[in-house]
Image (tube, rainbow, N blue to C red):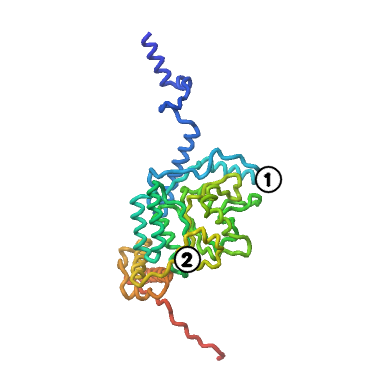
Amino acid sequence: MSMNLRTSVKHRRGSPAGSQATPANPSNPEAPPALPALREHIADLRVRAEAAHRQTEIGLPLPATDDPMVPVFQTPVPAGDILTSDRDVQKREEKIRSVLCERGPRRLLGAVAGPELAEALNDLYRTHPNFVEAIDLVVGEERLARQRGTALCGLRILLTSAPGIGKTEFSQALAAKLGVPMIVISMSAAQSSSSLAGSEVFWGNSRPGQVWESLIQGTHANPLIVLDELEKAPSNWGDPAAALYQLLEPRTSVQFTDKSVPWLAVDASRINWVATSNEITSLHEAIVSRFVVINAGAPPEEQLRGLIQSLYGMLLAEYGLIEQFPTHLDRQSENALLGGSIRDAKRLLRSALGLALRTGARELVIASLNPPATQRRIGFV
């Protein structure tokens, strides 16, 4: 009797037949997880692995294994309301639903506030001294986020200055310090709001915009989107900046709907935004009011010298030339670069490095910022 009882218990615990006979008990930690929870866990692992792969490719630190994840859309996904028999439209929706199922609703939160992030941000004071006001803002936001125990989300910064000061390059450096993906949208090339908010679903070539793609196809809920040269957005057809009225407003960006996927709202409120502009007088005041406007001027001479040395060092590291050229520019080369913009300095440094590599020289020769005009004889012979 006793042996039969032990055998019966062993059969129920260890055999497939016994497992099927025992109902799953949610309160039992040994019970198998529910299928939806298992699918979500697999999707989370896929997103984490993809984030690690992407950030390794671009030289960013790997995301921490304990970085939090948050949903960017609600599940279950609502049924679509397709009012057409067009098979292409139906196939497109089926493909989108397949992506949503595969990737799941959750994305990583990068830029988790803490001493490590604060130290990384403070390094920007050294590398970008003419953006002190912008750095102060981001550092302050980090402290507020740390107080709440969350990540840096929802930055809305409009950098304005004369051309060539380095606004876009600063945005790249900020994204690297935050450890989040960066998407650059050239507003001068945008033809309509479809670049941000997608195109209407009834178009045969309809596709989602950059916001939807960055949240659904991307890995993070708080990427950095750079709106480059916002003031140059064309106004002759459509309004490329129209979607910003909703996207830059915290209360409405929580339920952002892409025009090509009208049946699925996404939470775009955590996106970090940096816009660059040479001037803001042509921008609509409702757009400007949604940003913190920061004027970035040229740095003082001593800071500019330090910035030139920093640019030179970054170029050496980027092209693996640290052992081949001096680690610091000489004073004469610094002086040759002082009269122009940051953009001019970077261009001339690249040209000098390219020339030195071609000729086998060990020292750089910096071209003049203002070469003399070529003398040409005009007339008849």
Near-viewer residue (215 or 361): 215
Q: Is residue 368 shown above or below 12?
A: below
Give the percent coordinates (x, y) of residue 282.
55, 67
Give the percent coordinates (x, y) of residue 66.
38, 43
Q: Quadrant of residue 239?
A: bottom right
Near-viewer residue (282 or 87): 282
Q: Residue furthest bottom?
A: 381
The residue pinned by badge 1 equals 86
Whether residue 212 can be seen here: no
Q: Residue at x 40, y 45 (%)?
A: 67
| Quadrant location, the C terminus | bottom right
Label 2: how many residues lie within 10 Å, few (<14), some (14-19) or many (20+)?
Answer: many
The residue pinned by badge 2 equals 160
Q: Nearer the viewer, mark 1 or mark 2?
A: 2
Give the percent coordinates (x, y) of residue 107.
47, 45
Whether residue 299 can be seen here: yes
Q: Secondary structure at mark 1?
A: loop
Q: Is residue 375 shown above or below 71?
A: below
Q: Secondary structure at mark 2?
A: strand
Q: Residue at x 50, y 34 (%)?
A: 36
What amino acid is at disc 1? Asp
What amino acid is at disc 2? Thr
Q: From the viewer's perspective, is 326 left or right of 170?
A: left
| Quadrant location, the N terminus | top left
Q: Residue at x 55, y 41 (%)?
A: 98
Quote the CA–CA distance across marks 1 and 2: 46 Å
